[in-house]
Amino acid sequence: MLDNDPIPDIETNIMKWDWSEIFSPGQSTGSARSSGTGSDEAKQSLTGGSTSSLKDPNQRVPTIDERKRRRMISNRASARRSRMRKRNHLENLTNEVKQLQIQNQELNNRLKSLSDHNHCLRIDNNRVRFECSILQQEVLDMRQLLVFR
């Protein structure tokens, strides 16, 4: 990024352009800001460096505005992508619901068909059992007739 980057460093909360002022080649790290009054320090932090840069104090404002504008455009694009992902996800879920409803209807139809077939088989089974019991009774009756003769 630029040396005049007004975005604060996350860990130290010092502006990046303050780093160049603190660690300039002509100064030691211990005396970077120890001399000067608080108002001089405020002027330096507002202007982005030493008092010699007061010639153009509005230099950072377009940079900040440009950054805000770019960030706003980026955020809008990100929101648009997010809405598209959400819309696609919703469409996919809607399609999946429709497919599952169709599959559920097919399974219900198959269940009804198998249930009807099962009912018919039970009826036939009961009929055959009844006929079997009748035939068994007739066989017993015939045996008794043969034995008594």
Image (cartoon, rainbow, N blue to C red):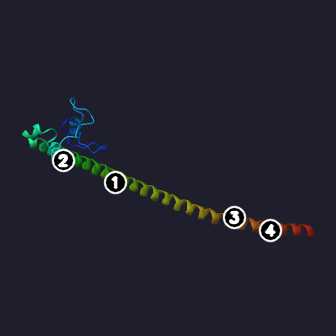
> Which residue is identified by label 4?
138
Could you say which disc has been placed on residue 104 in the image?
A: none
Camera-nearest label, 1 or 3: 1
Tag 1 and tag 3, C-beta contact below 8 Å: no
| Marks 1/3: CA–CA distance | 56 Å
Residue 81 drawn at (x, y percent): 27, 47
- Badge 3 marks a residue whose secondary structure is helix
Image vertical order of residue 93 relative to residue 20, above or below? below
Tag 1: Cα neighbours inside 10 Å, few (<14), some, or many (≥20)? few
Residue 101 drawn at (x, y percent): 42, 58
Name which of mark 4 and mark 3 comes first in the sequence: 3
Tag 4 and tag 3, C-beta contact below 8 Å: no
Is residue 149 in view from this perspective? no
- Badge 1 marks a residue whose secondary structure is helix
Could you say which disc has been placed on residue 38 in the image?
A: 2
Type of amino acid at the residue the image marks with label 4: Glu
Residue at the outermost left position: 55
Could you say which disc has been placed on residue 128 in the image?
A: 3
- Residue 145 placement: quadrant: bottom right
Tag 4 and tag 1, C-beta contact below 8 Å: no
Could you say which disc has been placed on residue 90 in the image?
A: 1
Looking at the image, residue 139 sits to the left or right of residue 52; the answer is right
Name which of mark 4 and mark 1 comes first in the sequence: 1
